[in-house]
């Protein structure tokens, strides 16, 4: 069922505390943690605790939760003292999505090229 934890999902395991992560922020509905393979000096992933496979499914199935994720990206950027940053949702394998639990990348601390490639 939409929103339910999935046994084979890496990020559901992070939410459940079954896989360690460097958590920088947690709310009732979201978790933010440092990316294991950072692409910028600051690279944080913000996820809903509930499982939706990508941002589109999240926005369609739980709009308030999508808003919570966006609010959390701003809160994380503030905490990291980023005045400029990039928020990325990769949706679908062709766009680079590799983990099928909705997540926002918050990237900052360096200049950004557009588009990177
Ligand atoms: P995607 O490619 O799906 O947009 O982003 C998935 C992100 O999750 C990648 O940037 C990848 O480095 C990160 N990632 C994959 N496995 C782990 C993990 O076990 N822990 C953490 N903290 N990040 C992970
Ligand atoms: Zn999940």
Image (tube, helix red, strand yellow):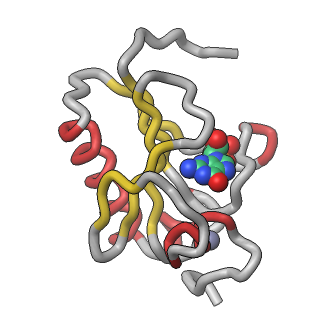
Seen as rendered, the residue at the extreme front is 20
| Image x and y of residue 116, in percent | 62, 15
- Residue drawn 70% across the image and 55% down it: 99
Q: Position of residue 71 (x, y in %)?
A: 26, 53
**On screen, 7 above or below 33?**
below
Q: Nearer the viewer, residue 15 or 102?
A: 15
Vertical relation: 14 (above or below) 95: below
* Viewport quadrant of the C terminus: top right
Q: Is residue 95 left or right of residue 85?
A: right
Residue 42, quarter of the rendered image = top left
Residue 109 position within the rendered picture, expressed as x and y whole percent measured from the top left:
36, 19
Q: How many marks?
A: 0
Residue occupying image coordinates x 25% and y 34%: 80
Front residue (pair 96, 40): 40
Furthest residue toward right: 94
- Asked if 4 appears above or below 26 in the picture, the reply is below
Q: Which residue is at 40% across, 13% downward?
A: 110
> Quarter-wise, where is residue 102 in the image?
bottom right
Q: Nearer the viewer, residue 108 or 35?
A: 35
User: Which residue lies at the image location 37% right of the left edge and 58% below the top edge?
Assistant: 69
Image quadrant assignment for residue 86: top left
Q: Position of residue 79 (x, y in %)?
A: 20, 40
Pick the quarter of the image with the N terminus: bottom right
């Amino acid at each position: 069922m939409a929103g339910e934890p999935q046994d084979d999902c890496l990020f559901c395991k992070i939410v459940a505390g079954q896989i360690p992560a460097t958590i920088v922020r947690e709310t009732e509905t979201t978790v933010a943690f440092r990316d294991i393979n950072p692409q910028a000096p600051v690279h944080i992933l913000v996820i809903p605790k509930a499982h939706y496979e990508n941002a589109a499914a999240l926005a369609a199935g739980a709009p308030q939760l999508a808003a919570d994720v966006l609010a959390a990206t701003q809160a994380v950027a503030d905490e990291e003292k980023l005045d400029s940053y990039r928020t990325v949702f990769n949706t679908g394998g062709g766009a680079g999505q590799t983990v099928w639990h909705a997540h926002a990348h918050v990237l900052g601390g360096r200049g950004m090229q557009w588009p990177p490639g």
